[in-house]
Amino acid sequence: MKSIGMNLAAAMAAACMALPTHAQSTEIPAPPQRTQVVLRNVAVHTAVPGASAIAKGWVVFDDGKVLAVGAEPMPAGTAKPDADVIDAAGHVVTPGLWASATTLGLVETLQVEATDDTREFGDFRAEIHAATATNPDSDLPPVARNAGILMAHTFPSGGVVAGHASAMRLDGWTALERTVRPAAGLIVRWPMMEPVQARWAKSSDEQRKDRDRRLAEIDRFFDAAEAYLRARGADASIDKDARYESVADVVAGREPVLIDANWPGQIEAGVLWAVRRNYRPVIVGGLGALEVAGLLKDHNVPVVVTGVNRLPLREQDHYASVYELPVRLMAAGLQCSLASGDEPAHERSLPAQAGRAAAHAPAGMMADVHAAMLGAVTRVPASIAGVGDRYGTIEPGKSATIVLWTGDPFEVTSSVRRAWIDGGEVDLNDRHKRMRAKYLEKDLQRAPTAPDEEPEPAAAPKK
């Protein structure tokens, strides 16, 4: 009994000590949609390819799905008599934005190891799925929702084959409830193909040996996985191997392989490797993608650019080369998604980054840069995550995952007025707003100074 009591006391003490680092959000997940909603007199940006924005339009959604979209006036009988009509003149409606290539939900505080579930031990962990480790009570998704980010393509990290990314809703009581697609791409971190010339780097020969060893390890893993799957197909009595079982959809071409690569040599080698194996490659990182755009276009390879708030690939590159990259890739005929490339606490920078990329687009390169960049943070990431048939655009039959903005979503002065995920209106409170309210209250509690009260004069300096 004594030892049990001591263990219980220790456990309680440990739990109390962990509370500050394991933040639990107080926002209540939205219930399923029960009342039809009509948004009227709004500027509607549907993100549908080739569709123009509707300057003054309406959107009707019910039971979690978009029923109709159009320009004012709305035809009689389009909505139910008891629908919740929101007349939001001067506001803008877009699909919910996506946080791509993110660890949102997998880590709370980078400096606290106990809150970090982004990686597992070992270099080849194909059986890992990001969805199983996400924290539905994290304080960070509510902050992202206030930037219009309602969906996430969440990536595990670490090792060579880090595991499967997952398509996630940023609302729901449990990780399972938030999961839209648990296996939304297998992450492979591609080695550098050319030696790095730096004082801290190994010799060129050692770097080449490391590269060749890593490439051989990747091939051995996937060779073994394919051999195992063939053997299991011929004899179902063979013992299951979770690592190799999880690669089945990649081998069959139903799930993409997400190749983490930035340098042109990395990108080229990774794409050719995937094509040789009949896999579906997606490049994540993509700083050097423009230099191999022809190869990427020939094989219809999408690119996830992980942020524009970073330095160019080479010292001699123009400072704006990263800002221009997403638009230049789209102008070259590539499918391009934009991620923030930031830590989870700062995913809210995504709309501003998209606006910066649009503002730096070379003149005359694209007809509608704004629409293209909106697609890069809505439609394209949904498609890459394998859920483009349900999310990413505002059109009949698609999920009612919608944001109502006070203005242009790419302007820092705009804010989210209301938001819905699968038709359920999400709570737009968050830790930032609670802290702001707290310190505004502190200011209000200060003792007031009488208007005619003058401060005492300062004492004269002593001679």
Image (tube, rainbow, N blue to C red):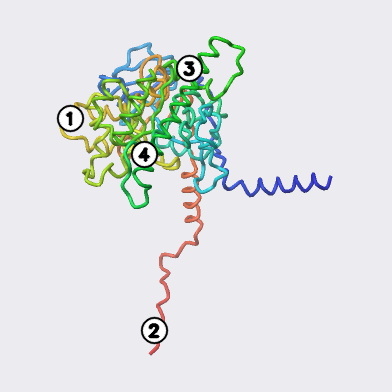
**Residue corresponding to mark 4:** 208
Query: Foreground mark, 2 or 4?
Result: 4
Q: Does residue 416 show up?
A: no
Under circle 3, the secondary element is: loop
Query: Separation of disc 2 and disc 1 at Cα?
Result: 69 Å
Give the quadrant of the N terminus: top right
Q: Does residue 354 appear to the left or right of 246 in the view shown?
A: left
Furthest residue in direction bottom, as rendered: 463
Which is more N-terminal, label 2 or label 3?
3
At label 2, the amino acid type is Ala
Query: Foreground mark, 3 or 2?
Result: 3
Query: Foreground mark, 1 or 3?
Result: 1
Residue 463's label in the rendered image is none
**Residue corresponding to mark 1:** 365
Residue at 37% x, 13% y: name it: 78
Pick the residue in front: 161 or 205. 205
Q: Position of residue 356 (x, y in %)?
A: 27, 39
Characterize the local packing of mark 2: few (<14), some (14-19) or many (20 or more) Cα atoms within 10 angstroms: few
Give the quadrant of the C terminus: bottom left
At label 3, the amino acid type is Asp
Which is more N-terminal, label 4 or label 3?
3
Under circle 2, the secondary element is: loop
Which is more N-terminal, label 3 or label 1?
3
**Residue corresponding to mark 3:** 63
At label 1, the amino acid type is Met
Q: Are marks 2 and 1 in contact (CB under 8 Å)?
A: no
